[in-house]
Image (cartoon, rainbow, N blue to C red):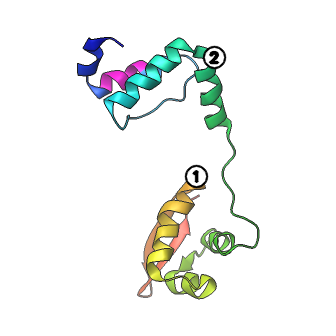
Amino acid sequence: MGSDWGHWPLKRLVAIWNSLPGVAPVEKFTSRQIALERIWRAVEFPTQARRNATAKVGKAKLHFRDGSKAAQAYALLCRPEGVTMCELQMLTGWQRHTVRGFLSASVRKQGSRVRSFQRAGERVYQVKS
């Protein structure tokens, strides 16, 4: 690797990465080292980088196992009226912090965003369409 690259701003490395053909564009890298490794790998093995990018882009969304608590909770989140925290707790038997973790991590992995609002003094969650 070129020693001068270690001093380039991350924004410049992102621009270089995003200009490479067939790669999945990124908004930022976690570190300069990761950026450099990915760029060099894409330059050295362009067909492999393209194959990895299409695998990630074309990959179907993760789905919850049928009948699981997560699948049931997600179905309630998709209702037009949404679901309250209490309803989710009663359905799953989870504690409040577990429900919040599910909403912030698992639902996001589904490619969905959760809307949160107050209705009649209760917190209501709903998957954004």
Q: Which residue is mark 1?
A: 111
Residue 18: x and y in percent read 46, 23
Place residue 87 in its image quadrant: bottom right
The answer to whether 64 appears left or right of 109 in the picture is right
Amino acid type, residue under disc 2 in the picture: Thr
As measured in the structure, the alpha-carbon distance from the residue carrying label 2 to the one carrying label 1 is: 27 Å
Magenta highlight on residue 12: yes
* Residue plotted at (39% across, 30% down): 34
Q: Which residue is farthest left?
A: 7
Residue range highlighted in magenta: 11-16
Q: For the N terminus, give its image quadrant.
A: top left
Crowd band around label 1 with a 10 angstrom C-alpha radius: few (<14), some (14–19), many (20+): few
Q: Which residue is disc 2 drawn over?
A: 47
Classified by dominant secondary structure, the portion drawn in magenta counts as: helix
Label drawn at residue 27 = none
Residue 98, magenta (yes or no): no
Q: Secondary structure at mark 2?
A: helix
Of residue 81 and residue 112, the one placed in the foreground of this image is 112
The mark that comes first in sequence, 2 or 1, is: 2
Say which amino acid is labelled 1.
Gly
Position of residue 105 relative to residue 29, above or below, is: below
